[in-house]
Amino acid sequence: MGIATIAVYADQDMAAPHTREADEALSLGGDDAASTYLNGEKILAIALETGADAIHPGYGFLSENSEFARAVEDAGIAWLGPASSVIDALGDKIKARRVAEACGVAPVPGVSEPVTSREEVEAFIASAGYPVVLKRADGGGGRGISIIRSQADLDLFFARHTDASDLGAHFVERFVEVARHVETQSARDTHGNFHVISTRDCSVQRRNQKLVEEAPAPFLPEGAHETLVNASRALFEHVDYVGVGTVEFLLEPDGNIWFLEVNPRLQVEHPVSEEVTGIDLVREQIRIAQGLPLTTPPEPRGHSFEFRVTSEDPSKDLTPTAGRLDEVHWPLGPGIRLELGIDQGDSVQTAFDSMIAKIIVTGADREQALARSRRALAEFSVQGVATPVPVYQDIINDPDFCGVGGFNISTRWFETTFMPTHDYSDLAVPAEASSTADLPRQTYIIELDGRRVSLTLPAGMFNAPAAAAPRPPQPLRSAPRRAGSSAIQAGPHQGAPGDIVAPMQAIVVALAVSEGDQVEEGQLVAVLEAMKMEKPLLAPRAGTVRSLSIKQGDTVTAGTRIANIATEEEAE
């Protein structure tokens, strides 16, 4: 389209692919989300300084922040997403439920009001039964979701959410145990034209985060496609949504379709819709902002899968890990598209999302797309970090997923059916393979006055005189570990009786106890967060909190001691 692009970056992303591809890249001057990609003032200041005409929301971070969208609008810069008023109406999940009810679209059975007390939740459970789910109204990407299956789960939730404002950010609804996650890639222009570009299925999930997505959604029951399109159109028209967005639904085996939410932005999985229609969705966002009519999409042709390549370790239940991509081989060939967040030689940090790439594979039909996917995933290899690609290889060969006569997948299938029958303990990455020691480079990225500059210099110019030849990268696979061996192989502390240790490098986002507190076995002690995944740490036994080794906001490494719980005898 002939449009010059300006990238912004956090310190650790200075050499990331998006900065290399942009015409200009400017630093946000920080190394965490709050000071960089969530800092709307800095981003807007850079846009004004550089004379930018528009800001693309991207996905995550500020993409659904109505205050930031409004600031962009007020500054006279085009916001390539829905209006701030629309984000207000749909970005908040409680408001979105009310919108759905107002236009005749059925949300998941629940309460479209903020939770104000435990009694309200218990009253809903009394009428709907277990399980229920408590969700943050501003949650996204699988975050802020607490599944309540028992009184113990409810106790744990309220032990963590004691502040009234925090509690009031949640709402309660029935937890739909067995359902597919289907969605529509929708778009509407300033002329009132509305189209569903394609449907998608995103049912392969873990911890409420998508792993494998595909378009169009396969094996829909009769009438479901029409219901999805009509519901999506009603929602967009009711709030005068102008732009590209995704409407998410749950599809139960009996055919019931429940509205989940609207994502007023581009989704991570949007490439599969592009692949089966030939529609460039970012181009459509720009055209819509220019007041041009939508491109009428053709009927979807072929089938497309997207596999999220993350730095998550299958041998540790897909726990996020840090490290460096010492050597990478990306698949190539017909129907294969790659979208890279980092590349060979780059380091994976824990400050942001764990996704490092997307592998998109398209074929003439679902069967061919699966065959190409098997080849593409077999061709992929990486040394230095663990990824879930071996898991994906098993998924696309599982009869529940690839059966030609049906689709026996639900949003709980991966966790309750697939993972319990698969063992990935032999995929542990040796500690030395995660080394982030620098290897000789020929291209150096430096910063001058906040701007990224690339310099090509003789290899080894900045190496220490005593530097040895680079150590050969270690292979991803190691010898199988003995049954019962610890999943945490490194860290400053391996754990003594009563110790609670960090299972991964993470940030301490909450502490629920103080030194000297009495705790019961299973009581919440702390909550860690790494790459959008929250991990509650529970007391391994009843006793007294003898020591707390960390405080809220600390960054800890795998194996670091968080606390020690002493029994009555030990405390004496």
Image (tube, helix red, strand yellow):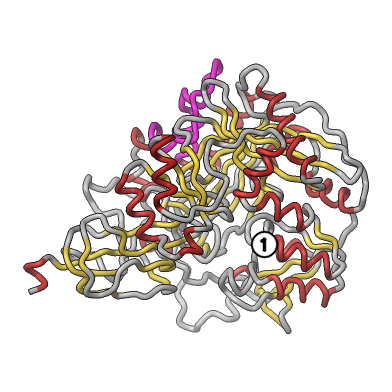
Classify residue 299 as left or right of residue 537.
Answer: right
Does residue 400 belong to the magenta stretch?
yes
Would you place residue 516 above or below residue 90 in this image?
A: below
Would you place residue 290 above or below residue 126 in this image?
A: below
The residue tagged 1 is 62
Residue 548 at x, y percent in the picture: 28, 74
Residue placed most toward the observer, 338 or 59: 59
Q: Amino acid at mark 1?
A: Leu
Residue placed most toward the observer, 372 or 418: 418
Classify residue 500 as left or right of residue 271.
Answer: left
Residue placed most toward the observer, 215 or 170: 170
> Residue at 60% across / 21% down in the picture?
219
Would you place residue 149 above or below residue 365 in this image?
A: below
> Residue at 60% across / 51% down in the picture?
357
Would you place residue 225 above or below residue 335 in this image?
A: above
Report the span colored magenta: 391-418
In the rendered image, which quarter contains the C terminus?
Answer: bottom left
Does residue 449 belong to the magenta stretch?
no
| Residue 84, image quadrant | bottom right
> Residue at 57% across / 22% down in the picture?
255
> Residue at 64% across / 78% down in the picture?
29
Residue 549 at x, y percent in the picture: 29, 75
